[in-house]
Image (spheres, rainbow, N blue to C red):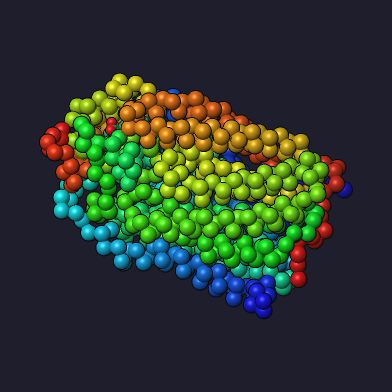
Amino acid sequence: MSSTTADRLKEFPSARWFIISAAMFFVITTFVGLLVATKFVWPEFMGTAKWLTFGRMRPMHVNGVIFGWLLAADMGVIFYLVPKLCGTGLWSEKLGLFTVVLFDTIILCAIFTTSLGITQGLEYAELPFVLDVGVTLAWVLFGLNVFMTIAKRKHKKIYVSLWYTMGAIIWTAIVYITGNFAVMFFTGVNQANLNWFYVHNAVGLIFTPLGIAIAYYFIPKAANAPLYSHKLSMIGFWSISFVYVWTGAHHMIHGPISQWLQTVSIIFSALLIIPVWTVVVNFFGTVSGRWDQVRRDPVLKYLMAGTTFYLLTCFQGPMQALRSVNAITSKTDWVVGHAHMALFGGFSFFVIAGTLYAVPLMVRRPLYSVKLGNHAFWFMLTGGLIYFFSLWTGGFIQGLQWNDASIPFVNTVISMQPYWVARLVAGTLIFTGAVVYLYNLSRTFWGPDTEEAPATETASVVQRG
Amino acid sequence: MKMLEKFDFNAGFFAACALLIFLVGATITTAYPAFTEDSWSKPNDGLHQYSESQLNGREVYKREGCWYCHTQQIRTLEPDTKRYGWRGVDAPISVPSEYVNDYPHFLGTRRIGPDLARVGGKYDKSWHRAHFMNPRDLVPGSIMPPFPWLIADDNGRDFDDLVNYLQTLGRSRDWRPAHDYEQ
Ligand code: HEM
């Protein structure tokens, strides 16, 4: 059965464009990450051109990967799974396409503003005011499309993935507005408190629920097994919606901020164990007994590795929040290892799995190469593991050295060098994986027509009413 | 149980509950302290308004991303007070009243380089000039980037302003017994 490119590329246009543009930004902005990592080993590298200095490339990398790649890829996959779960089309594909164009334009502008040094000087909120307004608009349009699709759904029962999607849209609106607009009215510690409320909840209430929504949909699909427990999903959802938001101040433990706020953030960081365990038990429970499938299928590999990294991240989080551990790890490379495990190892893996499963269905033909899918996975997994472990080790050692005031600061920098070299190797592997992934996706989209049977979907194991 | 079932079918009700339960923690950790923690917005006695030059110095600090590598907070930890002290005198622990004129705040989360909360008066201007031209000339093994354009462009105005700003850091606490601050 063969179909021409033109009639294959009809369904889910907004989802497709979000996903393919995100995959391009993935390659570009991890490459920027690689350049930044090079500067740690070779500080003069591209250092005398002002638009390529560390302080401008770093926000380019960070904003690029979290917005241009991760958030855009999440939105693309959500534009696929929400209509699927609702048994109807997306409310408005036109609006969806407009959202893609708007969002990608913002990211392109951001590449210029960051390199020109135009910044608001707050982490994750560097983008100038106009672009913030654009992001807000894009988010509102995205939310409108999702909510309207849910409103006209044919399947009455709301599956867990839809809970998390709705939660993410609502929470993100408030979190983003606080981090990008409310901060403009405050100074000093007050502003810092709002800033870290945003930074932390950007991860916890934007990327976590979107990533989990995606995993909740694709794990049962890819494993062809029913979800392990509906009750656990409920506990997981309601506990995260209550608990997560209290933890922002754990970025300032021992800092110039009220003790009660620090203690609250530490207690709630520990409570995070509940939502995390329920979700992880649910995911592993669903796949258990089907490990032979994992060996063959890159989708399940990403999902299971992602689940493992998510669990580890959320085991580290509460530990780092303890005052005694925090006194060693805070402000070191350890935290960078932690951040990459969450956003790359956890949530990027989830969304990559989603795209590898959904894109073939959208374009009605098999993934270009399962083998390349697996290769990309191994590149990213190996790179990821080297990245995380080297920075945890190096960061922990540096933290201990800092606590001995007789060691000059620069000596603690010099002793990080081997770990930074390892990170460079890791980054090269991750980047290679990203290139292979992009190639695989774009061949699936646009490669020459084949005689192969189109991709098929597993039966509706995802619970519906 | 009836209520839990409702979540399975009623999207509007579900969304409203998800918002409310989130708002509890959101309000208590952001709006509440903003209105009740007086010390967060009350300047300490020694704190001056920034001059125009110092404000531009902060712009440079922001633009060049110094704050990705340098924190500005002496934490309630002995290693911090010792490491950033001066000739055996411990650096005073940072308090919220030091920061009320800071927009944006530069407390920072990452120490690729040392903390700068008490660096005001530690080095003189010629040291900073050499350091910004090439940090490795003064501190071998440093990974701080060179910033020659601060000195070369516009007759070094950005450099002058940046140093003017750096020299204010920690000064509101007037913490060195000998008041031996470099200009
Ligand atoms: C080639 C792969 C990558 C390399 C070499 C790399 C490198 C870096 C470097 C050098 C930094 C600055 C760390 C510091 O200030 O000490 C950084 C920060 C960051 N990167 Fe990456 N990165 C890569 C991929 C990614 C990906 C895929 C994501 C997320 C999807 C990501 C998310 C982040 C975040 C959130 C930060 C800020 C961390 C923090 O503030 O603690 N990176 N990265």
The one nearer the camera, B132 or A289, is A289
Residue A242 x, y percent position in the rendering:
53, 65
Residue A298 seen = yes
Q: Residue at x 54, y 27 (%)?
A: A422
Q: Residue at x 49, y 63 (%)?
A: A173
**Would residue A220 appear left or right of A136 to someone viewing this image?**
right
Q: Which quarter of the rendered picture does the C terminus of chain B lie within?
A: top left
How many numbered circles does the render carry?
0
Residue A184 x, y percent position in the rendering:
33, 58
**Would residue A214 appear left or right of B135 to someone viewing this image?**
right
The one nearer the camera, B31 or A109, is B31
Quadrant of residue A386 within the rendered picture: top right
Residue A247 x, y percent position in the rendering:
46, 57
Furthest residue toward right: A1
Quadrant of residue A462 within the rendered picture: bottom right
Q: Which quarter of the rendered picture does the N terminus of chain B lie within?
A: bottom right
The one nearer the camera, A260 or A228, is A260
**Would residue A419 appear left or right of B114 to someone viewing this image?**
right
Up/down of A211 relative to A115, above or below = below
Q: Residue at x 61, y 48 (%)?
A: A310
Residue A229 x, y percent position in the rendering:
72, 62
Q: Residue at x 42, y 67 (%)?
A: B27
Residue A54 seen = no
Furthest residue toward bottom: B2
**Would residue A90 appear left or right of A223 to someone viewing this image?**
left
Up/down of A351 relative to A44, above or below = below
Up/down of A36 relative to A241, above or below = above
Up/down of B83 relative to A316, above or below = above
